[in-house]
Amino acid sequence: MPKLKYYQVQQALNQKSQSDKVNQTKNRLRSKLETIRFSRANCYGYALHLDYVLTPGSANANAIDWDNMHVIDTTRIKELMDACIADGLSSVNIGTYKIAVFINQYQAGGLDYHFYRQDPDSSWSHKLGNTGKITMQLPCPKIANACLVGVTDHLGHTITQQAFCGHLYMNPALNAETFDL
């Protein structure tokens, strides 16, 4: 194999650097467009591709009362997963995109859900609250969600602990009418 000359190596590195910059710009623009497109959505609405604030279980009037929950345990995890499945999400791959489900615990002692969705390029994205921006091009959601420990959300609450509940799959039949919106 012939040796590359210094200028050829430098040219290849410059092309890679320009390509990386273009990809970063594209991702920033895509994130801004998604944030505008889903300006009203919370993390669950965003994960379901709906621009609404949604609570797991609300499609069948079986929403979880998060105000009275203070400890992450197997009962809470099961309740959350069951509520999502009751809304129409699937626990088996039905040929649509994957959604990662979490429970976060806050410094004040309360619990809340959090969702990520897998995008067509296999990366993950999420929206923190209904006023937050959409963060895209994330790695595995377990890693991304771990980065939220110590973060203060849009309401001023700090996340102290979390639990991964599992993966669910989007049901293409879900839409605003499913939730009576």
Image: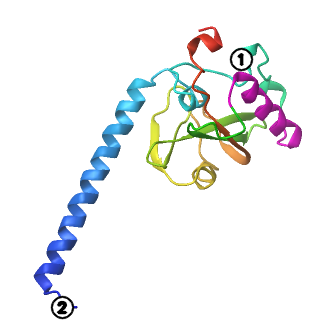
Label whose residue precedes the other's in the sequence (2 or 1): 2
Classify residue 175 by image quadrant. Answer: top right
**Which residue is the extreme one toward the front?**
95
Q: Please tell me whether mark 2 sits on a helix, a strand or a loop.
A: loop
Classify the position of the N terminus by image quarter: bottom left
Foreground of the two, 148 or 85: 85
Q: Position of residue 101 (x, y in %)?
A: 68, 40
Q: Position of residue 174 (x, y in %)?
A: 60, 21
Left or right of 139? Residue 1 is: left
Instruction: Identify which residue is drawn at 81% across, 39% down.
Output: 77
Q: Is residue 48 above or below residue 60?
A: below
Q: Which mark is residue 3?
A: 2
Badge 1 local density, few (<14 within 10 Å), some, or many (20+)? Answer: some
Q: Which residues are magenta?
A: 70-89
Inspect the image, locate mark 1, and give the three-letter code of the amino acid beneath it. Ser
Q: Position of residue 99 (x, y in %)?
A: 61, 39
Q: Is residue 60 above or below residue 156?
A: above
Q: Main secondary structure of the magenta part?
A: helix
Instruction: Identify which residue is drawn at 55% across, 35% down.
Output: 128
**Residue 22 in magenta?**
no
Instruction: Identify which residue is drawn at 52% across, 54% down.
Output: 139
Q: Is residue 26 above or below residue 61?
A: below
Q: Which mark is residue 30?
A: none
Foreground of the two, 150 or 28: 28
Q: CA distance from mark 2 to mark 1?
A: 64 Å
Classify the position of the C terminus by image quarter: top right
Indicate which label's residue lies in the foreground, 2 or 1.
Answer: 2
- Which residue matches tag 1? 58
**Which residue is the extreme one toward the left?**
7
Inspect the image, locate mark 2, and give the three-letter code of the amino acid beneath it. Lys
Q: Position of residue 67 (x, y in %)?
A: 79, 25
Q: Please tell me whether mark 1 sits on a helix, a strand or a loop.
A: helix
